[in-house]
Image (spheres, rainbow, N blue to C red):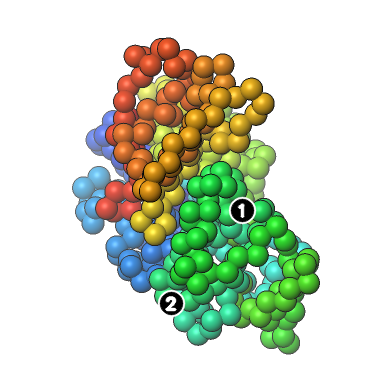
Amino acid sequence: MKHVIIGSGAAAVAAARTIRANSPSDEIIMLTADERIYSRCLLHMYIGGKRDVAGMSFVPTDFASANKIAIYYKTKATKIDTANKEVSFKGGGVKYDKLLIATGSRSFMPQVLGLRKATNVHGLRHLNDAKTIKDKASNTDNIAIIGAGLVGLDAAYGLTLMGKKPIVVDMADSILASNLDEHASNVYKAKFEEAGVAFHLGCKVVSVGSCSKGAVTEVELDNGTKLACELLIIAVGVITQSDLAELSGIKTDRGIIVDTYLQTEITDIFAAGDVTGLSETWPNAVLQGEVAALNMVGKKTEYNDTFSAKNTINFFGIPSLSIGQFVPEEGDVVECRESTKSYQKTILRDGIPIGVILQGDISRSGFWQQLIKDKVHIADMNRVSFANAYGLNEDGEYVWDV
């Protein structure tokens, strides 16, 4: 049996490991446009000079040989011949018995204001993005970031490690508005401001100035503020990289459409990770990769854990975890605890936890996901299996103990 995996992110790696563990003699081939396997979670550390390219890997150096995987780096799949079961790429192609598409997602680049055509406007999703940002940032101090979510602040944090002082713009009134409440986000905001980052919140870009060479030179906000800009980073969301599937006649809708076994409408073709549009979290991508792989080797397994309302954040040595809802509604019971080193907020609805924010100390916090996901009444706490923590291991892989 020959398994071909397109991609080299969390879902792809998890799938390859699972196939090898369950089918020792099957052939596994990975095709990836990237130059190596790396953790997206560490892109900001690369920008800041805290990790080199080799140090961004979340797999052992012998990953390919130990698992008997043939990895084709810098190889972008261009077409899938679903009838003849063949994946084409520049200069060749490869046949498959089972195929997994795990091509992930890419930065969303708005069409307005000519941003897509500008030569100095970039997203931050891939290693090449980080390399470009680091290179261009080294030659300018006029850097603006649109978006104060996780990706935008990743970029800002990496730039501060370079000694830069970027300006961050967002329509929300607080940073990390989709991840934390205002109290927890203000802890990070203060730290970023101490590092020289300036914020323009509650406003948006209405126009950009550009030079004859097609580069953005200035951005104007709806409050009339004009910001000089020689490097502009866009961090306003992502879209699935499902172009290959669409081109090959595989059904998509904001992502590749899959059934509960993560199989597409075409037999023997599966999809996992961000490209499915089911979730953008590392743990979900890993689980999808594992489930898809089990089905590829004939072990019928359903994917039924779609809970993705969870975030881990760590800037300036301050870890935070949010799970579920963090904005209460009328009638909810909100409990907050705060000390000089930590902040805890829980929201209960009819005796059931619906959301939690932990900042400063997130150890032994994994059980909150089970409470919230399974809607466990606090009177039934003895049903919960406690977990240790959420976070990154030393190789940059997002891990959690369950």
12 or 72, which is in the foreground?
12
Name the residue rendered at 58%, 54% in the picture: 175
Check the image and report above or below for 127 versus 253: below
Graded by Cα atoms within 10 Å as few (under 14), some (14 to 19) or many (20 or more), the crowding at tag 2 reads some
Amino acid type assigned to the residue bearing label 2 in the image: Gly
- What is the spatial separation of the Cα atoms under label 2 and label 1, in whole angstroms? 24 Å
Splitting the image into 4 quarters, where does residue 143 fall? bottom right
User: Where residue 358 sits: x, y (%)?
Assistant: 43, 40
Q: Earlier in the sequence, mark 2 or mark 1?
A: 2
User: Where residue 249 sits: x, y (%)?
Assistant: 64, 42
Of labels 2 and 1, the one closer to you: 1
Name the residue rendered at 49%, 64% in the picture: 192
Check the image and report above or below for 17 versus 394: above
Splitting the image into 4 quarters, where does residue 275 fall? top right
Disc 2 designates what residue?
Answer: 163
User: Where residue 134 sits: x, y (%)?
Assistant: 46, 74
Q: Residue furthest bottom?
A: 212
Check the image and report above or below for 8 versus 348: below
| SS class, disc 1 | loop
Query: Is 203 placed left or right of 359 in the picture?
Result: right
Quadrant housing the C terminus: top left
Could you tell me how many numbered marks the image carries? 2
205 or 63, which is in the foreground?
205
Residue 190 visible somewhere in the drawing? yes
